[in-house]
Amino acid sequence: MTKIWLIILIHQLIFQGMFAMKNIILHIKTGKQIRGNNTEANVSIAFFVLLIGVSFVFSLQQSPLGQVKFLSTYFSTITGLVLLVLNLTISLIHLKDSWRVGVVENQKTVLITSGIYRFTRNPYFVSYFFMFLAYTVLLQNLILLGLSIMGFIFVHIMIKKEEKYLYSVHGDAYLQYKKTVPRYLIV
């Protein structure tokens, strides 16, 4: 049997380790805070921790609550691993120094429209959606699907606030960018 708990543990060690290193390096490099201290960001981060924790707990159980086997273990594992690779690739490699979590009101950032930002205005959060989907598929769990949908809603609320802020900072340049690049990948 596939050790899903081990996949989730290794993924989180890599993801959180790279995230922490990236935060430290970016903070040293820019001398600026990279995380907004606002309700939307705080709620989303707390929810991410909850979803990751529930995923890990479910991965340790033989038949977790909400489990529905709709794929073979082989196919769900391969699909989950592909989604986790996408998560790591987008969030921690392609973003480089162009990212913040939540709105940092007193910071004026440059509007980045190149690289991965040509395909999505929110690559960091798209990467989280890949992680939510990966854990849901790996564990084939309806509760995780519900939590993932809730996570999407929390992220969407945070993104809407960020969009207002970006418009206030970048004006028409941001409006033009919004017209040509989707918020997520297709919408």
Image (cartoon, grey):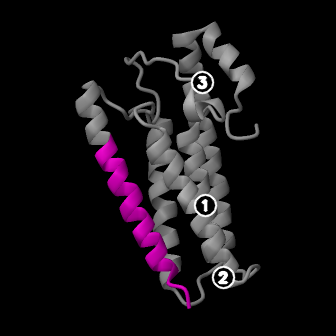
Lower sequence index among marks 2 and 1 = 2
| Residue bearing the label numbered 1 | 83
Lower sequence index among marks 3 and 1 = 1
Residue type at numbered disc 2: Tyr
Tell me where the magenta segment starts and ends, as one range.
Answer: 1-22
Q: Would residue 26 appear left or right of 1 to someone viewing this image?
A: left
Which residue is outermost to the front?
A: 115
| Residue bearing the label numbered 2 | 74
Structural distance between the alpha carbons of marks 3 and 1: 26 Å
- Residue 73 placement (x, y as % from top left): 66, 83
Structural distance between the alpha carbons of marks 3 and 2: 40 Å
Residue at image point 48% right, 61% down: 50
Structural distance between the alpha carbons of marks 2 and 1: 14 Å
Query: From what the image shows, is residue 67 above or below residue 123?
Result: below
Residue at image point 56% right, 32% down: 115
Residue at image point 56% right, 91% down: 1
Q: Is residue 19 magenta?
A: yes
| Residue bearing the label numbered 3 | 163
